[in-house]
Image: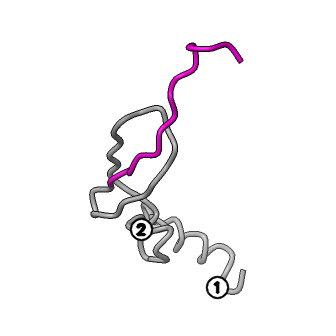
Amino acid sequence: MKDKIHPKMRLITVKCACGAEHKIWTTRENIRVDVCSNCHPFYKGDKSVLFVDTEGRVEKFRRKYGEDY
């Protein structure tokens, strides 16, 4: 590799809005995120927010194909 052309990698702490902190290797000095694996509903297992039923599509499907499909 050529000298002095690659950015310097450093271990930093990424801070989430929920207060969680994660350590990663990056070339940036400071990273803040809004959602991380500790507070995102998908990773927490909160099934109520995973599927958004707009305009009754689930009910329409169940009427057409039945509950057992």
Q: Nearer the viewer, mark 1 or mark 2?
A: 2
User: Does 17 appear above or below 59?
Assistant: above
User: Which residue is the site of mark 2?
Assistant: 38
- Secondary structure type for disc 1: loop
- Secondary structure type for disc 2: loop
Q: Are marks 1 and 2 in contact (CB under 8 Å)?
A: no
Residue at coordinates 33% horizontally, 39% vertically from top-left?
A: 30
Three-letter amino acid code of the residue under disc 1: Glu
Could one spot residue 47 in this view of the protein?
no
* Residue 4 lies in the magenta stretch: yes
Image-quadrant location for residue 63: bottom right
Residue at coordinates 67% horizontally, 13% vertically from top-left?
A: 2
Q: Earlier in the sequence, mark 1 or mark 2?
A: 2
Comparing 7 with 58, the one in front is 7
How many angstroms separate mark 1 from mark 2 (CA)?
Answer: 34 Å
Q: Which residues are magenta?
A: 1-15
Residue at coordinates 44% horizontally, 77% vertically from top-left?
A: 46
* Residue 24 lies in the magenta stretch: no
User: Does 48 appear above or below 22?
Assistant: below
